[in-house]
Image: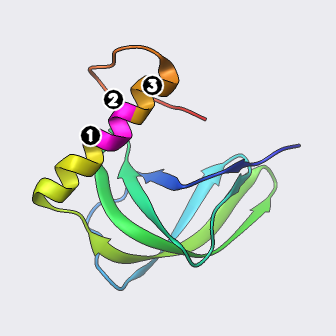
Amino acid sequence: MGAEIKTRTRIGRKNLEVGKIYKFSKKEYRVYPVGLPIDLLNRNWEAVAKVVIIEFKNTDGRTEGKYKVVKIYEGKEKEVLTNYWRENVKLIKQEEITDFSDVKVS
């Protein structure tokens, strides 16, 4: 049984606050870089925040853990990072995508 290494994660949570710690739970096993900043994206592949994974564990076909928000993306920075991630999705899928809601990639 394998696990994918993640350099970003996607969530449906709203109203994040810098400095707060949040829990997450994902289907399947995943591996996150603990202590290193990664981008947090919403389900539409929009850049939301920069977070640091504090801990995670893989059990019973799920990955659960905690992350700390270190920065909320806004304005031009959010736009540039959103375009970056969406371009990556298009390259991976090898197709033009106009609706990014719940597009999934491995």
Residue 19 percent location from the top left of the image: 35, 86
Mark 1 vs 3: CB contact within 8 A: no
Residue to which mark 3 is pinned = 91
What is the tally of numbered marks visible in this picture?
3
Residue to which mark 2 is pinned = 100
Q: Residue at x 61, y 35 (%)?
A: 106
Please indicate, yes or no, whether residue 12 appears anywhere in the rendered image. Answer: no
Q: Give the foreground label among 2 and 3.
A: 3
Check if residue 11 falls in the magenta segment. Answer: no
Mark 2 vs 3: CB contact within 8 A: no
Q: CA distance from mark 2 to mark 3?
A: 13 Å
Q: Which residues are magenta?
A: 83-87
Q: Could you say which quadrant of the image residue 68 lies in?
A: bottom left
First in sequence: mark 2 or mark 3? 3
- Residue 27, above or below 100: below
- Residue 36, above or below 64: below
Q: Residue at x 89, y 43 (%)?
A: 1
Which is the main secondary structure of the residues drawn in magenta? helix
Element carrying mark 2: loop
Image position of 58 (left or right of 76): right
First in sequence: mark 1 or mark 2? 1
Element carrying mark 3: helix
**Around disc 1, counting alpha carbons within 10 Å, would you say few (fewer than 14), some (14 to 19), or many (20 or more)?**
some
- Residue 9, above or below 20: above
Element carrying mark 1: helix
Tag 2: amino acid: Phe
Residue to which mark 1 is pinned = 83
Tell which residue pokes out farthest to the right in this image: 1
In front of the other: 46 or 13: 46
Q: Give the foreground label among 1 and 2.
A: 1
